Amino acid sequence: MSEILTKISSYDLFNNLFPGTLFIVLAEKLLNIPLIQESVLVGIFLYYFVGMIISRFGSLIIAPILKKIKLAKFEDYKDYISASKLDDKIDLLSQINNTYRTIISMLILLLLLKLYLFIESYIQFLQDYRIIILLFSLIVMFIFSYKKQTKFITKRIKASKK
């Protein structure tokens, strides 16, 4: 178990495991959704996965919205790579920035979950399709995450050739 924890990078800890765990705890305490796991091992994997979902939601939905309403301004990715080579603090600052975005995403997802539960209490058939809605949403989100990650990899490869 401790070996697993030592292999988790600080990025994974603060952008996946921490927000996933916090989401699970808040969902149970605030929304009465029992998701806390008795098994530590199962819990770590579940909380990490929930954190990945939260992080991806932030990357795909929250960041573009914040950019669109001009609350966040991004530099060109090529410039980010070049600047990171000159100033190693940029990676740390980027990680902290992503943690803030993920916390925003977590809070918004908690709010959306509460809203969904409220609507579901009035529209009975939604309960019957809860799993289908969840799985479809996750499939779409991870398809777009894959596309975005592939684009980042391609940009890094092109930048390294220069």
Image (spheres, helix red, strand yellow):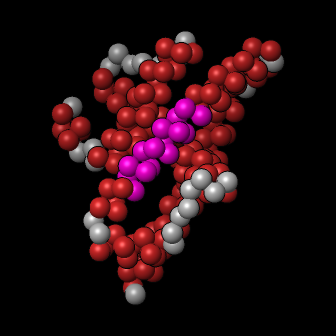
133 is higher (above) or lower (below) than 55: above
Q: Is residue 64 visible?
A: no
Residue at the (20%, 41%) spot, across then down: 6
Q: Is residue 16 magenta?
A: no
The answer to whether 65 is drawn above or below residue 108 in the figure is below
Q: In the rendered structure, which segment of residues is drawn in magenta?
A: 94-108
Residue 152 is situated, as x and y percent measured from the top left of the image, at 48, 67
Name the outermost residue toward the front.
71
Q: Magenta region, mostly helix, strand or loop?
A: helix
Asked if residue 101 can be seen in this view, the reply is yes
Residue at figure coordinates x 40%, y 87% from the top left? 162
| Residue shown at the point (64%, 22%) measured from the top left | 114
x%, y% of residue 63?
58, 52
Front position in the image: 3 or 25: 25
Q: Residue 140's x, y, as percent?
A: 64, 47
Question: Is 23 placed above or below 137 here?
Answer: above
In screen coordinates, is 68 left or right of 80? Answer: right
The quadrant in which residue 129 appears is top right
Quarter occupied by residue 5? top left
Frontmost residue, 96 versus 8: 96
